[in-house]
């Protein structure tokens, strides 16, 4: 948690994140089942880093299980850093280098930035390093390789569209 808070303050200073109020309004593709205390994510394209870090912090505080199915791209993969996360056996995790647009509108890519790598579990960090790291273009983790690195959900993941 200390790493995430330090990371957030660093990224805020770089202009990568939006205001907390706007981050709460922007939600990831997912639904929360209050009866089972699970948050299901299905086919998420990612989004603003801050909104995902906020949801992870909230899920960890409330001991909510995060279940990932379908594709989980970009910032969505940060859910892997939650305390209680699992993936559907058919999920696809899609990683790329973080980036932002500077004051001149140019895309600034931060390949292999350690501040982002440490948000993932060590098993995923090692896999990313073995596959070139957080770089452009996409790196996709799925199937047996994914099942060796990330807990697979027992039952199929349910979701709402």
Image (cartoon, rainbow, N blue to C red):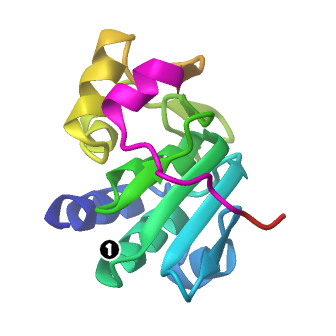
- In the orientation shown, which residue stands out farthest toward the left? 2
Magenta stretch contains residue 144: yes
- Is residue 17 in sight in this rendering? no
- Is residue 44 in sight in this rendering? yes
Residue that mark 1 sits on: 60
Q: Is residue 75 left or right of residue 30?
A: left
**Numbered-mark total:** 1
Q: Where does the image place residue 136, in percent across and percent down from the top left? A: 55, 18
Residue located at (50% from left, 55% from top): 16
* In front of the other: 13 or 135: 135
Q: In this view, does 61 lie to the left or right of 147?
A: left
Magenta stretch contains residue 97: no
The stretch in magenta equals 142-158
- Does residue 51 lie above or below 87 as drawn? below
Residue located at (20% from left, 36% from top): 122
* In front of the other: 110 or 135: 135
- Does residue 138 lie above or below 99 as drawn? above
Q: In which quarter of the image is residue 53?
A: bottom left
For label 1, count other residues whose C-alpha is less than 10 Å away and answer few (under 14), some (14-19) or many (20+): some
| Secondary structure of the residue carrying numbered label 1 | helix
* In front of the other: 50 or 41: 41
Q: Where does the image place residue 73, in percent across and percent down from the top left? A: 62, 39
- In the orientation shown, which residue stands out farthest toward the right? 161
Q: Where does the image place residue 82, in percent across and percent down from the top left? A: 34, 59
Q: In this view, does 22 lie to the left or right of 146?
A: right
**Which quadrant is home to the C terminus?**
bottom right
* In front of the other: 133 or 149: 149
Residue located at (32% from left, 20% from top): 127
**Which quadrant is home to the N terminus?**
bottom left
Q: In this view, does 59 lie to the left or right of 48?
A: left
Q: Where does the image place residue 38, in percent across and percent down from the top left? A: 51, 73
Residue located at (44% from left, 51% from top): 86
């Amino acid at each position: 948690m200390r790493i995430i808070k330090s990371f957030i303050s660093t990224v805020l200073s770089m202009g990568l994140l939006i205001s907390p109020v706007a981050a709460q309004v922007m939600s990831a593709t997912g639904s929360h089942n209050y009866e089972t205390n699970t948050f299901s994510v299905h086919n998420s394209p990612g989004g603003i880093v801050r909104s995902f870090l906020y949801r992870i912090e909230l899920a960890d505080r409330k001991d909510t299980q995060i279940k990932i199915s379908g594709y989980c791209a970009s910032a969505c993969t940060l859910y892997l850093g939650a305390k209680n996360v699992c993936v559907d056996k058919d999920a696809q995790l899609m990683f790329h280098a973080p980036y932002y647009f500077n004051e001149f509108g140019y895309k600034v890519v931060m390949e292999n930035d350690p501040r982002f790598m440490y948000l993932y579990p060590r098993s995923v960090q090692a896999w990313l390093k073995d596959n070139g790291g957080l770089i452009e273009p996409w790196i996709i983790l799925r199937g047996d390789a994914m099942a060796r690195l990330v807990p697979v959900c027992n039952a199929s993941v349910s979701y709402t569209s």
